[in-house]
Amino acid sequence: MDSKESVGQSKWGRSRFGGSTALLIILSLLGGLVLCAAMALIWWTFGPEADQQRKMLSGLVFALLMLPAASALCWVFMLDRDTLAGAVRDPESSIEGKWYEKAAFGAFHDLIALCGLGAMALGLLRIDVEPVMLLVGVVLLAAVDVLVRYLVIKKVEG
């Protein structure tokens, strides 16, 4: 009997430390709540200056908006992949993994060239740019570069 057949699989999977699917979901939600409470506390402490009521409301809205992502992150860390129905056994060896690897490799070289040319242009032209906006632009460009390369590779090889 295959090891996958001996482990019960479900749409949402089971936790690494045993238990049912319901336990995994409950623990993921609780972990998400704890993470969101910590993020709200950080927002409360280091966020923009405002009166206490406004800071509390903004911290609560921030935590509620982050709850789905924080819970999903906890679910990913607690999930036993062997119990998830339809999960690829070795995702790094899949064809999609190979496509991503090629796309990221090419985008990295594009990024090196872009940063070098950008540094030269900023140095020669004495352009005053907000560093945060510059870094956000570089990260967005890198993400778009990887996405475009991935889709091209997928179309060519797939």
Image: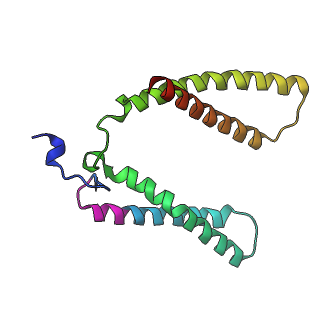
Determine the residue located farthest toward the left in the rendered image. Answer: 1
Q: Position of residue 13 (x, y in %)?
A: 29, 54
On screen, residue 24 versus residue 48, left or right, reads: left
Instruction: Give x and y (percent) for residue 7.
Output: 18, 49
Q: Residue at x 66, y 26 (%)?
A: 111
Determine the residue positioned at 13% across, 40% down. 2
Part of the protein shown in magenta: 17-27
Q: Position of residue 123 (x, y in %)?
A: 85, 25
Using the image, determine if residue 49 lies above or below residue 109: below
**Magenta span main SS:** helix
Q: How is the image coloured?
A: rainbow
Tell me if 72 is positioned left or right of 119 in this view. Answer: left
Answer with the quarter of the image where residue 124 lies: top right
Q: Does the magenta run of residues contain 18?
A: yes
- Where is the C terminus found, in terms of image quarters? top left
Q: Residue furthest bottom?
A: 53
Q: Nearer the viewer, residue 149 or 127?
A: 149
- Image vertical order of residue 28 relative to residue 98, above or below: below
